[in-house]
Amino acid sequence: MPIHSKPNYWILETDSTAYSLGVNSHGLLTHAYWGKRLPSQNDYPETPVMVNWESFNNAAHLTPEEYPAYTGMKYVEPDILVTFPDGVRDLVLHFEDAELQAGEKPELHVHLRDDHYPVQLTLHYRVHEAQDLIERWVSIHNLGGDPVMIERIFSALWHLPPGQDYFLSHLTGNWNDEMHLRRELLTYGSKILESRRLTTSHQHNSWFVIDHGNVDEDHGEVWFGVLAWSGNWKLTAEVTDYAATRLHQGLNDWDFAWRLNQGETFTTPSSLAGYTPDGFSSASQKLHDYAREHVLPHGKMLNKVLYNSWEATFFFVEEESQARLAEMAASIGVELFVVDDGWFHKRDNDWTGLGDWWPDEEKFPHGLAPLIQKVNSLGMDFGLWIEPEMVNPDSDLYRAYPDWVIHFPTRQRSEGRNQLILNLARQNVRDYLIEKIDHLLSEYNIRFIKWDMNRHVSEPGFMDSPGDPREIWVRYVQGVYSVWRELARRHPEVVWQSCSGGGGRADFGILQLADQIWVSDNTDAIARLSIQEGFSRVFPANTMEAWVTDAGKDILPLSFRFHASMCGVLGIGGNLMLWSPDDIAEAAKWIDTYKDIRHIIQLGDLYRLRCVSHDNCPAIQYVSKDQAESVLFAFRTYMPEPYRLSPIYLRGLIPEAMYNVEGCATPRTGAAWMHDGLQIDLNNFQSTLRLIKRVE
Ligand code: DGJ
């Protein structure tokens, strides 16, 4: 059992790390340790006890409380704020008891209780030993008669070892330009990252990494984490006035409130965090392994090479032209043919149709069956695009139920891409969507769904909410999850992709439902190298759908575009009808190669050998878990001549074993490839793929 319990003290051990907490002599639940696993259980520090220091520095303010509530003379960020029925806004939590739960993923539950009001708070911990991760979430239970208003309830507070300077790495971006790495020194005060957009957002991701500054991809201590949630979230990185660094992570408290009635429990999403002494690549690998082992619906499945119609035909999808594309796709080895936007009732452009989820009568006079049969007869699975959460005002659905959208009754409804958002906090909306999509999935042989979401929220009204109208932020996301979960339950044969105008909904919450993420609408391979690198910091390659399209084709050779997309789940999105016979032959060759190596890419360990964020010659390596096979991709974007590329030092090989690197004359030991490296010369806009195999 990796959770050890001493009187009023608990140690959570993973394979290489440890986390400890306890109740100090003042009765406060206090953080004690988080970092490398120590040889003996007696090595872990006692829970700290702080004393007042002048009237301005009360003990409560100085103590590294495990989960501080707003009460007393405490001016650090609290993790929970409530208002009791009598208007009191002061939550005084005392340790009640703790339980351990054995099992495959052992858990610790620590119960705290207010000393006056009938409210119980439970801090939950789950240990993921092999991935060195601790999962935390919180539940609050109203044991009394009157409702309690929750105004903030974060999932976890992560304390960093005291007395050090820390850097925060995070991802920022925009639509068409997601996932750029930023790294900055944390100084006194708070740095807030958040989403207020109803979904995860392209702008910021809830992933974080903290380090001391002397860290690279392979060396140095880092603490890292994610929030498993697809709605408004918040991360506050706080350096207190006594230089204690701590990270609060959870639901965004901006415009948030939740009425907790008698006997009800509110549970937060999970925050997952880990520690590694081995740099940024190691932190990514642990998250990747966790996603594949514990999160994804089919984490060990090899994802198929798909074709997607969007960039080839946009809204002009109809039976005949899609059938011709399907023939071309099958001829180059595609395994899954996906019809994107444009297939449903009156969807000729982005002004109409959303909400009316049945095939357009003109484009598909006999429904989708003839096209699906054609696709299947070509040996491919069939997939379809939907955007269930949205409605165009010009649709049968909106004409029938205009009040189903998120809105304030007295305000104009702001449209984004000519669409409004259905309020999935409402049960009748959920039921409608389940019925319509279930019908599609039952009638047709559909094996893949791309679930899109193409705007963010405005006028977030929910006037007939069963609780406080501001519950919409959470109830909406619960609604998305519940519709999706129900459809997945009824149709286990379907693989799902999460898309929100590209990578607007990429998080560990949605990955419990979706095996793949559409990373960005930007399919230019050079832009992709950077976006994909940011994505790879959090998510494994088997979730990273990447298409070869016609973007950038005047500068970038087809091989470069293929190599960039082969770094994830390879897809094709270009207009094959316009590709030359040479391009078609080359595409078939790369798809064939990809099928031979995709197990290494999708399920192996990733090493960022040279990062595009520092270098115009990025290199990425994937290594199979048994370290017998590996794939190296190297790219050169643009460097003015003369320029000599530095050697590439491989990673993840067994030092004593011999490996052959494609294109190199003689096998060498893993140690030689890793420490002496190999020289690969590339011209501007050239790339290479090298297979690496253990030979003895
Ligand atoms: C946004 C997606 O990211 C694109 O791939 C495409 O599906 C369009 N929506 C369709 O409207």
Image: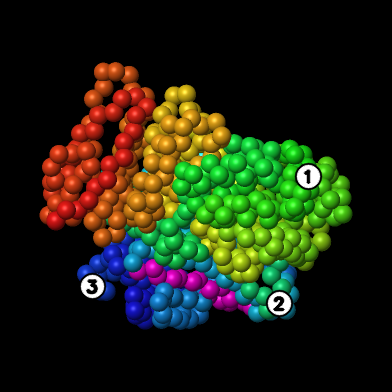
In the rendered image, which residue does mark 1 sit on? 362
Question: How many neighbours does mark 2 have within 10 angstroms: few (below 14), some (14-19), or many (20 or more)?
Answer: some
Local SS, label 1: loop
- Camera-side mark, 1 or 3: 1
Q: Are dots 3 and 2 in contact, CB under 8 Å?
A: no
In the rendered image, which residue does mark 3 sit on? 40
Residue 618, given in percent of the width and then of the height, sits at 33, 36
Asked if residue 152 shows in the view, the reply is no
Residue 172, given in percent of the width and then of the height, sits at 50, 40
Q: Which residues are magenta?
A: 112-129
For this rendering, which residue is in front, 127 or 335? Answer: 335
Q: Quadrant of the C terminus?
A: bottom left
In the rendered image, which residue does mark 2 sit on? 262
- Report whether 540 appears left or right of 484: left
Q: In the rendered image, which quarter is residue 488 located in?
A: bottom right
Residue at 23% across / 25% down in the picture?
Answer: 644
Sequence-first tag of 3 and 2: 3
